[in-house]
Image (cartoon, grey):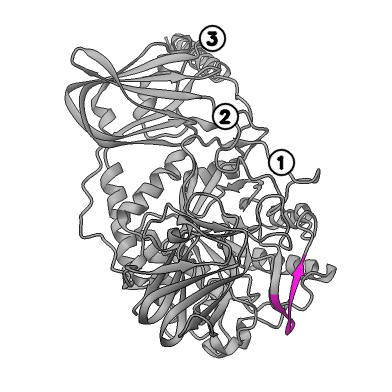
Amino acid sequence: MRLLTRQKLSILSAILFSTAAYAQTDAPKPYGAIPTERQLKWHETEMYCLIHFTPTTFQNKEWGYGDAAPSLFNPTKFNALQIVSAARSGGFKGVIFVTKHHDGFALWPTQTAAYNISESPWKNGKGDLVREFQQAAKQEGMKFGIYCSPWDRNNPEYGKPAYLTIYQNQLKELYSNYGELFMSWHDGANGGDGYYGGKNEKRKVDQSGYYDWMNTWAITRKLQPNASIFSDIGPDVRWVGNEKGISPETSWSTITIKGNDGKPAMPGFMDDANLGSGTRGGKQWIPFEGDVSLRPGWFYHADQDGQVKTVAELFSIYCKSVGHGGALDLGLSPTTEGLLHPKDVSTLAAFGKLLKQVFNYNLAKEAKISVSNVRNNQKQSFGTANLTDASRYSYWATDDDVHQANVQLDFKKPANFSIIQLRENIKLGQRIDSAGIDIFKNNQWQELAKATSIGSNRIIRLSQTQTAQKIRIRIYAPVAIALSEIGLYLEPEIKSADTKGTANTYPKTNWKATSPAATGLALKNAADNNESTVFETRTSNYIDLDFSRPLVFSAVGYLPAQDGITAGAIEKYELLSSEDGKNWKTIASGEFSNIKANPILQRISLAKKITTRYLRLLAKQTVPAPGEKGSENNLLRIAEIEVYSK
């Protein structure tokens, strides 16, 4: 009897093993480029924050010039835990700290350059801001990443071969001494004006080769093998191509990256036409990151306290970044005290609360789910139960020759929903071309929505709540389908109290705009309260405003064109005033940093209030049009000019 029992157990074990092995070998073959293990972990992270805090904060600038005295940096109430915990309350899972921005000021006691935090009065020169953020992240259970700018506007060796060794040694210090990193973050900043070793000059570099990126990134691979490398071109995560945090409706995680002038693509040196959309069937799996700041700028500016993004805006960005198969990287900007402003903290907490409300319960779990095809009829391995088990990697699959299939959800009673979420098992590649959503209404199926490029996450956000007892999802793919999750959610109403403050701008009644050799209605576009219209000229590098009466003001705003064309945006400016429209004096000058990537409203704060009737905005340098060099460029484009009473 005992022998028979053992025989039965042996036979049963063999059958189970054989069944499991069959299911394993019968899985769909991967399609196209597929993610690495580190990329899978990045996809699972979905949301993290990028923290900008350097002497630039104390200068009230967006990009530091490299000339700030170290004594300027002294955040008397600095608290990394307050900043990181606020990020965590927003549902973010990691933080990336800007350890050195373009100003060149290292926020750790580096041995590679004298211009660093040990020269500041903060903690009597014994502080280490990188360590503080790394420890705070660890305490809060958050992932930690690092950005160290390759462009250094202070280092005397920048632009010379010797600087590459300095930069690589900085990365070695950072990647060896601050624990495990989840991100190695880089951008395409490639030289320009600076204060290099005290020399006020412009230094350009060969974008295609100066940083020797392949060997520089080899440092990351060796010292931080689990860290995903972000840059314009990846190699693990790519830039979405804008600083609004959003991607196009169709955005593939696969892409074919192309360089310029027959040279390999490098950060800041590439054909960026498909950064947002990716490439269907692209050679590489390089998903996008949508980066955007919680405020208009990446650094803290007190005059932007009333311009913190609302919870509604953040959720819209979330749906167009995380919800398009990428990740959301939200910029946080500590104040000069070293804390997040209370408005930033409360907004993050409210956003995190909203995410929990929206995605707390999947209504699809209440439905009876049926499908038109199950792979080899293996319902246990590839059946409908996998569609609502909250696992990214269990999945419903079809036979190899079934490239179109339907999923139907039948509810016992009508369900209210406003969000549909779909996920693919991306371990098998990005397989699905498109999906259509139908509801059964008036005894017939009616199309409600459709989507392309599903990937790791696709959120279809409806314009209004829908009620249906039957829902059908039509899936199309060039290969067998492998859908891992279906979610139905109801978005709560966001409180109307979540609004922004007023801007204190003067009305533009009776304003007149003039510019040499530029005539017609286009001039009015610079002061017509319409962001979609543009004043454009190639015949003049300035525009004059006649307010018709003297105005008392403390700041001027410049909004570059909002039509997606960055050429002609002002990079360097001079602001002049006049009592008679003939004799002019300079009241401000400077640069609009990062305006090509982030063409937002630029505010020029004056040293003191002035009273004048005439104002001139002079463009000393603008973004060149494609194919033009700076010396050839004379294009000037303005969407709107504002004047602030306070």
Over which residues does the magenta segment extend? 194-204
- Residue 634: percent from left, percent from top: 65, 61
Sooner in the amino-acid sequence: mark 3 or mark 1: 1
Kind of element beneath mark 2: loop
Nearest the eye: 258 or 52: 258
Q: Which residue is mark 3?
A: 401
Quadrant of the image containing the N terminus: top left
Q: Residues within 10 Å of mark 1 (few under 14, many from 20)?
A: some
Number of callouts in the render?
3
Nearer the observer, 466 or 327: 466
233 or 166: nearer the eye? 233
Residue at 77% in and 45% down: 264
What number is the disc on residue 242? none
The residue sitting at the right extreme is: 161
| Cβ atoms at labels 3 and 1 below 8 Å apart | no
Q: Quick one: quadrant of the C terminus? A: bottom left
Numbered circle sitting on residue 429: 2
Compared to 130, does 320 lie above or below? above
- Name the residue that disc number 1 marks: 258
